[in-house]
Amino acid sequence: MSQAVPSSLMITLIESVSVLSDDVLCLIFQFLEAKYCIGSCSLTCKKWHQLTKSVPLHVKYFRINYSDLVRVVSTDQKLALNLSSLDLNGAEIKDRGVKCIAESEFMVNLKALYLGSNKIGDEGVKYLAESEYLKNLQTLDLYFNEFRLDGVKYLTQSPFMSNLRKLILSATFYGAEGVKCIVESPYLTNLQILDLDRNKIGNEGLEYITSSQSMSNLRVLSLSDNTIRNLGLKYIAESQYMSNLEELTLKSNEIGDEGIKYIAESQFMSKLGKLFLTTNFIGNAGAKYLSDSQYLSNLHTLDLSSNQLDDDGVNYINESNLMSHLTFLNLSNNNTSNNKNLALDNSVIFVLCCVVLGKTLCSCWF
């Protein structure tokens, strides 16, 4: 049987907490679960009750039924008004759930909304786009849903989306025409992070992005599995609007060595810090282009896994200036031997070989 806390110790604890400044208390509250912060801390005393009203809450549900969703975003006003981030990825709320969120007047402080994999159709996106209560959103994640081009149009034509900084619209298959809607939107000019993976945008869609001044604030661009070929890389390399890119993901495309050459020789890629090029038919020539680049001096993360490099390609990288600033290099699933004679001056993490044994992934890190 547990013993009661001695009254003298309880008084000491209360006195210790009471001397903390309001700023420190608010910081502590932010690390607590939302239910505990609202359900317990807010009931402790008048001071804490007032402080918890200003604490931004981050709530995540893997599964949620409709009645609970109504409570979270509408009925429970103390919780709803404090919501800064609502993560419902995979919760399967569908269009009905989206409507519930969009019509709640208590969503005015919401900054981030994650609705990936929720079977949301065009109608659901329309609810979001027409909601004045979501005008403060800075992050919107709608990956792998069921809306198509009409849904993209609703979103891009909404003045309530003008504060978005991060937009994830991967795996919804709207093609190049959807990209055109995004870049021509007068309301999406503040985007800094754009994820359009798996949408079949091709070189045409990439040309829309790179030729649009409205995309000049992009720092992170993810375009994996979009049937992009080397010409698409030329569009990126020659675009002054891409000069702020710090992270570029192009996994599972068909850019080849020629595409790498465009990137390596581009003056507009000088801020690039992360480059992910898994499965792109890149050989030793591509590795040589990267190694000889005078513009990739800020590159610290490079993923060339599942390509066509052999030991010569590895040596090009190993003997280049790249090695002086790389902190992560992935060369797994290439035609390389387990060569450990690599420069490790920066304590760089290497992934040189990767073997799949059943469901177990065995990697060699050096």
Image (tube, rainbow, N blue to C red):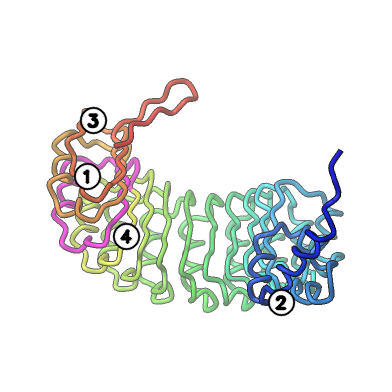
- In whole angstroms, how far apart are the C-alphas of marks 1 and 3? 21 Å
Q: Is residue 281 magenta?
A: yes
First along the sequence among labels 2 and 4:
2
Q: Which residue is mark 1?
A: 344
Name above or below for residue 173 compared with residue 56: above
- In whole angstroms, how far apart are the C-alphas of marks 3 and 2? 54 Å
Q: What label sits on residue 132 in the rendered view?
A: 2
First along the sequence among labels 1 and 4:
4
Q: Which residue is mark 4?
A: 273
Quadrant in which the N terminus appears:
top right
Name the residue located 87 percent from the left edge and 65 percent from the top edge: 75
Q: What label sits on residue 109 in the rendered view?
A: none
Question: What count of labels does the image hold?
Answer: 4
Instruction: Kindly state the secondary structure of the residue where label 1 is placed.
Output: loop
Q: Position of residue 106 (x, y in %)?
A: 78, 72
> What residue type is disc 4 on?
Gly
Name above or below for residue 360 compared with residue 277: above
- In whole angstroms, how far apart are the C-alphas of marks 1 and 2? 53 Å
Q: Which residues are magenta?
A: 277-304
Q: Residue furthest top?
A: 358
> What residue type is disc 3 on?
Asn
Count residues near mark 3 (Cα–Cα under 10 Å), then give few for <14, some for 14-19, many for 20+.
some
Instruction: Kindly state the secondary structure of the residue where label 2 is placed.
Output: helix
Instruction: Kindly state the secondary structure of the residue where label 4 is placed.
Output: loop
Asked whether the viewer can see residue 43, the reply is: yes
Asked whether the viewer can see residue 154, the reply is: no
